[in-house]
């Protein structure tokens, strides 16, 4: 009898472990290459802000790597050292002797990282994807041109469908919620952050162009809860404000 009770207890514990939600705190920040509205370039203060909020993953846009503007520094690495996170870079274009693009910061090392080109007639755009055991997190900075943004959504949606787990994408989409592009994007993706709290410009924000979105896989074995989405009140470090949300994946 005692053995049966013990076995039942183990089974219940295992079931509880399987059904326990995975909590993931996600952030997105267009850092303007660390150049603040006070005209100070300070990578450490951005890293410290990220460290204080302690996200699991961060999507970062507008980052130099080894350019003359950044005095040869790998900017994402500088921020990662202060934040205490792993860094993964995706260059979009050649710029001032180095590269310019986007990147991810992650507390844990992902299973896999992939980088993809996206269209942009004013400048080439990029997408970076990190796969983790329970979810996928991606970062992008979309084109200023609507046709290029629409083409990018098709590419992103096709890539997201390759994963049988929740797919999250964050970044500067260069589009407001009232634009036709937003309706195109939300056919496959659901916003986790608000479409009413402005994110740009940082000192006097009046438009929303930064988002974190999700896509549930076709298997529909998951539910996602969005907890405390927030536009962080940071008016100086960049020309955008950072956004953050905690999710529960069931």
Image: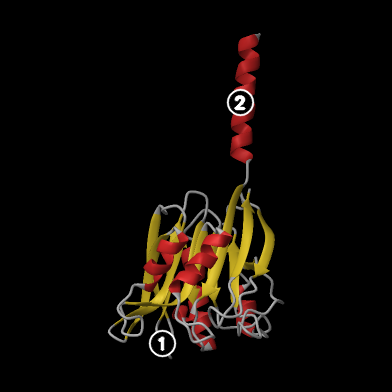
Above or below, 137 against 12 in this view is below
Q: Position of residue 90 (x, y in %)?
A: 38, 71
Residue 188 in sight from this viewpoint: no
SS at badge 2:
helix
Work out how far the residue at label 2 is from the one at label 1, CA to CA, in angstroms.
55 Å
Q: Quadrant of residue 245?
A: bottom right
Q: Position of residue 151 (x, y in %)?
A: 49, 80
What residue is at 30 percent from the left and 78 percent from the top?
A: 72
Q: Could you say which is closer to the camera, residue 208 or residue 71? A: 71
Q: Could you say which is closer to the camera, residue 144 or residue 222? A: 144
What residue is at 64 percent from the left and 28 percent from the top?
A: 12
Q: Which mark is residue 11?
A: 2
Q: Pointer 2: residues within 10 angstroms few (<14), some, or many (20+)?
A: few
What residue is at 63 percent from the left and 40 percent from the top?
A: 19
Q: Residue furthest right?
A: 196
SS at badge 1:
loop
Q: Quadrant of residue 3?
A: top right
In which quadrant will I find the N terminus?
top right
Query: Which residue is denoted by mark 1 in the rendering?
Result: 123
Q: Position of residue 247 (x, y in %)?
A: 63, 56
Q: Quadrant of residue 242?
A: bottom right
Q: Pointer 1: residues within 10 angstroms few (<14), some, or many (20+)?
A: few
Q: Which mark is residue 85?
A: none
Q: Could you say which is closer to the camera, residue 40 or residue 148? A: 40
Q: Position of residue 211 (x, y in %)?
A: 60, 72
Residue 59 in sight from this viewpoint: yes
Question: 64 left or right of 159?
Answer: left
Question: 130 left or right of 9?
Answer: left
């Amino acid at each position: 009898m005692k053995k049966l009770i013990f076995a039942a207890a183990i089974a219940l514990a295992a079931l509880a472990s399987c059904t326990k939600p995975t909590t993931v705190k996600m952030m997105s920040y267009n850092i303007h290459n660390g150049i603040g509205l006070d005209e100070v370039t300070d990578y450490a203060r951005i890293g410290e802000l990220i460290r204080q909020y302690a996200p699991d993953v961060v999507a970062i846009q507008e980052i130099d790597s080894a350019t003359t503007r950044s005095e040869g520094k790998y900017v994402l690495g500088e921020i990662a050292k202060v934040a205490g996170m792993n860094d993964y870079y995706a260059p979009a274009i050649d710029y001032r002797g180095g590269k310019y693009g986007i990147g991810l910061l992650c507390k844990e090392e992902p299973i896999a990282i992939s980088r993809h080109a996206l269209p942009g007639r004013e400048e080439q755009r990029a997408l970076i994807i990190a796969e983790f055991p329970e979810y996928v997190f991606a970062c992008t900075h979309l084109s200023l041109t609507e046709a290029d943004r629409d083409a990018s959504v098709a590419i992103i949606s096709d890539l997201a469908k390759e994963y049988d787990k929740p797919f999250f994408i964050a970044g500067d989409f260069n589009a407001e919620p009232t634009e036709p592009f937003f309706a195109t994007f939300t056919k496959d993706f659901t916003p986790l952050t608000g479409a009413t709290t402005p994110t740009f410009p940082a000192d006097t924000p009046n438009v929303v162009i930064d988002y974190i979105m999700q896509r549930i896989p076709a298997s529909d074995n998951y539910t996602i809860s969005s907890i405390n989405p927030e536009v962080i009140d940071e008016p100086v470090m960049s020309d955008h404000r950072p956004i953050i949300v905690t999710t529960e994946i069931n």
